[in-house]
Image (tube, coloured by chain):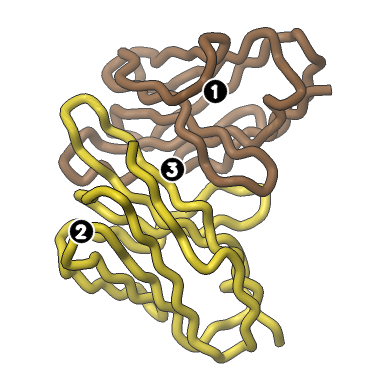
Chain colours: A brown, B yellow
Amino acid sequence: EAGVTQSPTHLIKTRGQQATLRCSPISGHTSVYWYQQALGLGLQFLLWYDEGEERNRGNFPPRFSGRQFPNYSSELNVNALELEDSALYLCASSLVAATDTQYFGPGTRLTVL
Amino acid sequence: GQQLNQSPQSMFIQEGEDVSMNCTSSSIFNTWLWYKQDPGEGPVLLIALYKAGELTSNGRLTAQFGITRKDSFLNISASIPSDVGIYFCAGHFFSGSARQLTFGSGTQLTVLP
């Protein structure tokens, strides 16, 4: 069974541009979560999508947004990129069940120049 | 919001030694999860704990869900070089639609030959 997949692996943008990151959850998982991990730091929760709707978001500005498609895959969009947006962006998926164990993808490394 | 304190921040041990790390929270959690992250990759789930007092093993790894539901520990026995990485605890608190994992800051483990 395939795990969570993310694309692209690496993304290089310049300040002010927009970035789009993609995630495909484990088959059968309906929830997708996005996290930001800046270099040397822990994971900061960004967004949670379930059944196509945004259910919760972390303490990030509105220029971080996303969506979930009918096949449960998801996009994270970051507008007006700033240098401090450089980080590893991780996607996780889970069943929407009591346990809610999250399984992570390999991440997308975003570098803003 | 929920806060997690993970300790120690880093550890240097000799190959073959046992390792112990723990997390404490300011709030009660419904689940505790332990992940390992290698550089530039996504966290990989090691052990999931769902009930207070639960003690679970996965090979050389053992983790416990504290009775008070505010703490958890992870032990690694007979460490080997491939144990090197960052270990994160994560706690899950269910409160209606507020469904997200809170992560500890990580324990960087170095295994010396």
Mark before the other along the chain sequence, 1 or 3: 3
Secondary structure of the residue carrying tag 2 is loop
Q: Amino acid at mark 3?
A: Ala
User: On the image, numbered disc 3 is attached to which residue?
Assistant: A2
Asked if B47 appears above or below B40 in the picture, the reply is below
Asked if B20 appears above or below B99 in the picture, the reply is below
Are circles 2 and 3 on residues that touch, CB within 8 Å?
no
Q: Nearer the viewer, residue B98 or A19?
A: B98
Residue A81: x and y in percent read 71, 14
Question: What's the distance in space between the residues labelled 1 and 2, CA to CA?
Answer: 35 Å
Are circles 1 and 2 on residues that touch, CB within 8 Å?
no
- The quarter of the picture where the C terminus of chain B appears is bottom right
Left or right of B76 on screen, residue A70 = left
What's the residue at 19%, 57% (across, down)? B50
Chain bearing mark 3: A
User: On the image, numbered disc 1 is attached to which residue?
Assistant: A22
